[in-house]
Amino acid sequence: MASVVTQKVKLLVALLTLQLCFAGYHIVSRLALNIGVSQVVYPVYRNLIALLLLSPFAYVLEKNQRPPLTLSLLVQFFLLALLGITANQGFYLLGLYYASPTFASALQNSVPAITFVLALALRLEEANITRRDGLAKVLGTIASVGGATVITLYKGPPLLHLQMDLTQGDTLEVDQSTKTQNWTWGCIYLLGHCLSWAGWIVFQAPVVKKYPAKLTLTSFTCFFGLIQFLIIAAFAEDDLENWKIQSLEELFIILYAGIIASGVVISLQTWCIQKGGPVFVAVFQPVQTILVAVMAALILGDQLYSGGLIGAILIVLGLYLVLWGKTNEKKVTESSPSLTNPLLKAEEENKEIDAASKDIP
């Protein structure tokens, strides 16, 4: 009995540490943009460090698990990198530049619902609204999309304090209008980040069935993502000064993104999924949003707005409805094999991939 309690405490501590690492990535990424780190150079260094960190482990640990490489697999790895690395991280940094870490984290809670919609469109998922689980998934998706829409279109008044200089007159109104427009674009970019992330999850499930060596697959994804960002950098970042690490602060930010956000998080997340299951890990996702809100207020002085709070509540409600629906659907399909659909089979065979939506962007 004592050992069972100890294991549960270990899992709880690991999950909280995982969400803290995730939250830290949002903060250091915002700090990187604040001090002027290039939006192209930053992901290049991050993926280079992640590749150097993961590839030796993949080579040693998966020597006997790797199927032979084919041109078709390499093309699929390239497309996975395009969705899961380049578009995912690119849209995230663009969105974070205009919005805030808190709302970036809040919008990420909508990824499971967006994944469900994409899987439904590709007929990899079903939604039987005559059953409670199917209705929960549909209502959860609607709540998540509604919450994301509220965050994007309605900023609302600040909740903590109002910083306004009334002596600025008309200039203040113009600045406020520009800030609102930028905020909307930031949220749109973050939605693009969530869409590409969800697309990566859906596309990754069948690829893992063909190529089950997950560390090697992740290493190839990082490699192709690095190549793609270098191609973008050749056109978008021609100033060599931006490639130089100017301070210890920049060095810490880049090392955190590469080592903690890509290396430690993958290992810790895999362990948590093995011990607690993908749904249990997913349930802790909103903890990250709370941690980000607190850290952003203390470290960055970020403001929390009423529109963001309303949207975040709707998204978290939608997240739990979708997860509840998925859990109960699995119970139904296990008792009635004829109801099993392709995506559920993929989830059963690749439990780690079912929780891939928790990876850092």
Image (cartoon, rainbow, N blue to C red):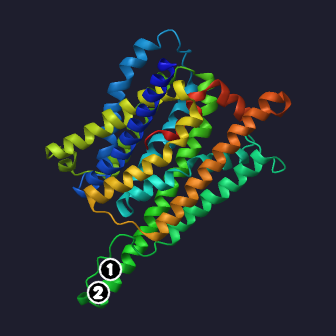
Choose between 215 and 6: the one closer to the eye: 6
Kindly indicate the quadrant of the structure image that contains residue 296. bottom left
The residue pinned by badge 1 equals: 175
Tell me if mark 2 has few (under 14), some (14-19) or many (20+) residues whose alpha carbon lies within 10 angstroms of its own: few
- The extreme top residue here reads 64
The residue pinned by badge 2 equals: 171
Left or right: residue 159 versus residue 84 is: left
Q: Residue at x 39, y 66 (%)?
A: 304
Left or right: residue 242 versus residue 9 is: left
Pointers 2 and 1 in contact (CB under 8 A)? yes
The residue under label 2 is which amino acid type? Answer: Thr
Left or right: residue 330 versus residue 172 is: right
Q: Residue at x 61, y 48 (%)?
A: 320
Choose between 6 and 27: the one closer to the eye: 6
What's the CA distance linking mark 2 and mark 1? 6 Å
SS type, badge 1: helix
